[in-house]
Amino acid sequence: MSVKLFVNTAQLKIKNETLEQQYRSALSAVVGPIQEGVKRSLSYVTGFLHEDVELNEYLFPTRLGERGFEDISLEFNDGSSGLKEVLALCIRLAVAKHLSGRDSQCLVLDDPFVHVSLDRSNKMIELINDAIQEYELQVIVFTHRQMEFAGFTGKMVDIQSVK
């Protein structure tokens, strides 16, 4: 028995365009608010030096804009180690804030400020403290540098002292 399939290419094209439009719309609804949160945090932490960032659909940074240089942008891989860490933390924080509307979130950070300047570390700690209070985030920080804990609010547990 032979089966013949007739495809209307015009209808197929319309269906594919509609699916692509719905995908982009859903993606924008998720990535858009996260990207805006990252922009605000990154701008604050860098002293408004980096006011623009583009994230792809996987929330990976693809471009960083620099204040005063609208025509010039950095590729993510061209940034310093400290800038990459700041940006990664801004993304994690924005995702946790976005998801906290549905469920409580826990942010786990492993040596988050190892390559970050003291000034930027302090600003990141401010943002994390604000998120802890406003979004009721739980934050677990692993670090070998106890001075990083000085700025955090909330209950601290030193696992070395727990037996």
Image (cartoon, rainbow, N blue to C red):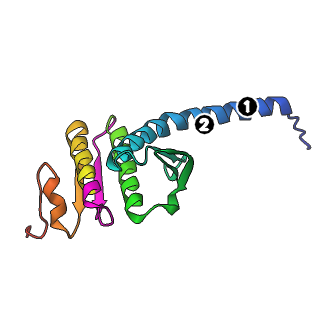
Task: Check disc 1 and report its element: helix, strand or loop.
Answer: helix
Residue farthest along the front direction in this orientation: 68
Residue 133: x, y in percent?
19, 39
Q: Which residue is mark 2?
A: 23
The mark total stands at 2
Q: Residues within 10 Å of mark 1 (few under 14, many from 20)?
A: few
Q: Which residue is mark 1?
A: 15
**Sooner in the amino-acid sequence: mark 2 or mark 1:** 1
Q: Which residues are magenta?
A: 102-120
> Dividing the picture into quarters, in which one does residue 10 lie?
top right
Q: Is residue 11 magenta?
A: no
Residue 17: x, y in percent?
72, 33
Name which residue type carries label 1: Lys
**The C terminus appears in which quarter of the rendering?**
bottom left
Closer to us: 42 or 138: 42
Q: Is residue 155 left or right of residue 30?
A: left
Q: Is residue 103 magenta?
A: yes
Label 2 to label 1: alpha-carbon separation? 12 Å
